[in-house]
Amino acid sequence: MLTAKEIRDSFKNFFESKEHHIVPSAPMVIKDDPTLMFTNAGMNQFKDIILGNRPAKYHRVADSQKCLRVSGKHNDLEEVGHDTYHHTMFEMLGNWSFGDYFKKEAISWAWEYLVEVLKLNPEHLYATVFEGSPEEGLSRDDEAASYWEQFLPKDHIINGNKHDNFWEMGDTGPCGPCSEIHIDLRPAEERAKISGRDLVNQDHPQVIEIWNLVFMQYNRKADSSLEPLPAKVIDTGMGFERLCMALQGKTSNYDTDVFQPIIKVIAAMAGTEYGKDKQNDIAMRVIADHIRTIAFSITDGQLPSNAKAGYVIRRILRRAVRYGYTFLGQKQAFMYKLLPVLIENMGEAYPELIAQKDLIEKVIKEEEEAFLRTLETGIRLLDKTMEETKAAGKSEISGKDAFTLYDTFGFPLDLTELILRENGMTVNIKEFDAEMQQQKQRARNAAAIETGDWITLKEGTTEFVATTILNMKLPFFVTARSNRKIKLYIRLYLITLHSMQKVVVR
């Protein structure tokens, strides 16, 4: 049985043999694109090439890309850990052609890799092709279908609609039909009852898409019309975790060696065993998924915070901490202790994890400890609120109670909703939003109060001693060299103030 590492390497080696240049993964956190917070597909780093904003250095490229999907239309956060195949952070194996090969090669190489190299059973594979769109003057993708007919029987080639089989970057820009490859992982007795063909794109956990071949051949103009691209592009993406599941004979991504080493460490910490308790298993899967997301985000320069991308990472971290606290008895910071096993499994492929190990550990530990203080109080108050609500014969807590938890105790609304959902309850969101608006109005009113530049609290002179400032300990992420430089600037500033008789330096 191939290991995850061997599978990742085999993909790169295969396309290297097809004259592709192997490039490293781009950062998962995007800093220079206002349309995206995180890399959510393998093509993101090639966006400017595809749009024609810069030339391609290599016309054939392949890689394994770190991706994160927790916002926008690709938001599967609530499913993560509860099913077998949704994740926040995942790897996307991909190969690209910028004005070089097109449909024939993309399809034949995909088949060669899956069937001849990886030895997947061809009888369990299905391909979808774009069925066409009469309103846009687009016919069925007979070209792609004809190439698939060289490998698959016609009943394994399925027409797909515009939603599933016509890929678009956005409202304008490069687009084109795509061809998905699905695999049926069900046991023989189930396949005998219902054909896999009837379960393709029906959200069956064991009849899943593993590879999408996108044929970008049009440009969508501002008036929604289509024109042929001067240079056609191949953009493929294969879910690494799903491929590992298929090759390792598992029915869940979490049962592969991508996740099992992490899950075993979590189970040992909690003094339990994976597979014995449904709720504990969900908690372990959530934590195993989320530690990858958090570690890679910090590595790529995004610290947890209260704004934008930083808030997304903080929310994911807190979600994992809460699962560990409630279901696995983890009352102290524990997630940072998972970093060694993560590095052991992924450090070779992504050496940035090793380089940033100390930073990742410190950030996660500090975030955990801060949130655990909030969590204990919040859960206790929420439990009391739920008891009172149930005693009154209701299943919905008031938005005012939820807002008090949020505003006074720092307990996030999404965490309140998660705990309520586990207990068959809900929260009145309209009331919560109304309380939030009132709070914002109070803040605006307070800010609108006019005052002078100075308010005299006490007449006379005050002596300010600067020793404390010069001896203070700066944050851990400030290097020793920067530490000395900052304190030098502070001392110079204080000496200036001293010369103006504003401060005493001792």
Image: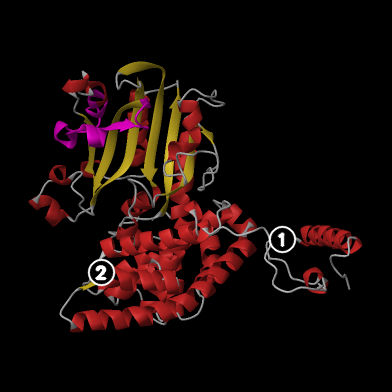
Q: Helix, strand, or loop for circle 2?
A: helix
In-front residue for pair 56/309: 309
Q: Residues within 10 Å of mark 1 (few under 14, many from 20)?
A: few
Q: Residue furthest right?
A: 499
| Residue annotated with mark 2 | 421
Q: Is residue 225 left or right of 312 when viewed as pictured? A: left
Compared to 162, does 189 lie above or below? below
Compared to 403, does 125 lie above or below? above
Residue 302, position as x, y percentages in the image: 55, 54
Q: Residues within 10 Å of mark 2 (few under 14, many from 20)?
A: few
Residue 39, position as x, y percentages in the image: 46, 44
Quarter of the figure with the N terminus: bottom left
Residue 152, position as x, y percentages in the image: 21, 33
Residue at 53% over, 73% down: 370
Image coloring type: secondary structure
Could you tell me the amino acid type at mark 1? Val
In-front residue for pair 313/354: 313
Residue at 42% over, 59% down: 440
Pointer 1 or 2: first along the chain: 2
Which region shows up in magenta? 145-174
Compared to 483, does 47 lie above or below? above
